[in-house]
Amino acid sequence: MVTIQDLADLFREDNDIVVAPPAECRRFWPEVKASAHFRSRRDYLDFMQHNNGRIVYLQCSRETTPPFVLVGNWRSRSDIAALWYVKAEREEKRRLVTGAAKICLEEGSKRFITRPVTPMEAEEYASWGFCPHSRIILLEKQLNRQPPPVEMEGIRLLHFRTRDLAEVIRVDRLAFDDFWRLDRRTLETVAGSCLHNVFLLAKEEGRVRGYAVGGSNGRIGYLQRLGVHPLYQGLGLGEALARQLLRFLYIMGATVVSVNTQEDNLPALSLYRKLGFRDTGEYRVIMQKTRREPHRGGK
């Protein structure tokens, strides 16, 4: 039996959850900038305009900036909505996350995903009806000395130039499956996300065949992205790019380098372990909710 109070709670559950109008999204920027997903306020507003970005918040809150979540397209995928930032705790977090998922799925998204979360957070999301999408393995390498120079016959390892961006995106689309491909905005954000950054290209006869992105924040370095054209995979090009990147990270002052990849990406795991990376024993999980398709009966 449902009591009157239960009905009131159910009614309030949906009615307190509001999607901010576009003109109101600016006031949430001071909180959002802590997420490191956006390089600047301009980048944030561009995301809101072109990636179906939306602020979903609790209208009943008396706080100056109410509890809210930021959702938007997963990179350039209009069929996948992503939870980019959460400013809420406990019951407010549950209501906002599940409410935002419901909004996105009802509006046509086939999938609603989280950022990579800790195992403890994954259990929290699972209790709200989410299930695992991908498990991300974390690896580290102690960078005690500078790796030796890298050379490959016919291949030049160069620094990225803006004129090469279209070719890098093309290689990325060929190198990664549909879910993991980067769009231009995400690639540019990753390439500028650290205090010191490096973006390397592998070129053959003037054409981009692979690329590597990394950076350092003090003594902590990151190998953030490594992509190789499928026709050049397995030939040592990825290893050459990674080793050259490690050389620059060492010069930048990094003594520990982190990298992560999907649990089922065995070629990448094999390469990183060959380069001296070791599993930390930690992992992250991308959780998801999917749209339930209506049952279709048949004869």
Image (cartoon, grey):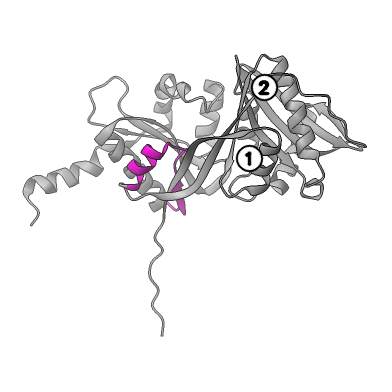
Residue 88 badge: none
Question: x%, y% of residue 120?
Answer: 36, 38
Q: Residue at x 53, y 47 (%)?
A: 78
* Foreground residue among 162 and 286: 286
Residue type of the residue flagged with mark 2:
Leu
User: Which element type, helix, strand or loop, lies under badge 1?
Assistant: loop
**Residue extent of the magenta highlight:** 107-126
Residue position for label 2: 143
Residue position for label 1: 182
Question: x%, y% of residue 227?
Answer: 71, 40
Which corner quadrant of the image does residue 148 belong to?
A: top right
115 w.r.t. 190: above or below: below
Q: Earlier in the sequence, mark 2 or mark 1?
A: 2
39 w.r.t. 20: above or below: above
Q: Is residue 257 magenta?
A: no
Q: Nearer the viewer, mark 2 or mark 1?
A: 2
Residue type of the residue flagged with mark 1:
Leu
Q: Is residue 56 left or right of residue 111?
A: left
Question: x%, y% of residue 150?
Answer: 84, 29
Q: Residue at x 82, y 45 (%)?
A: 235
Q: Quadrant of the C terminus?
A: bottom left
Q: Residue at x 41, y 81 (%)?
A: 298
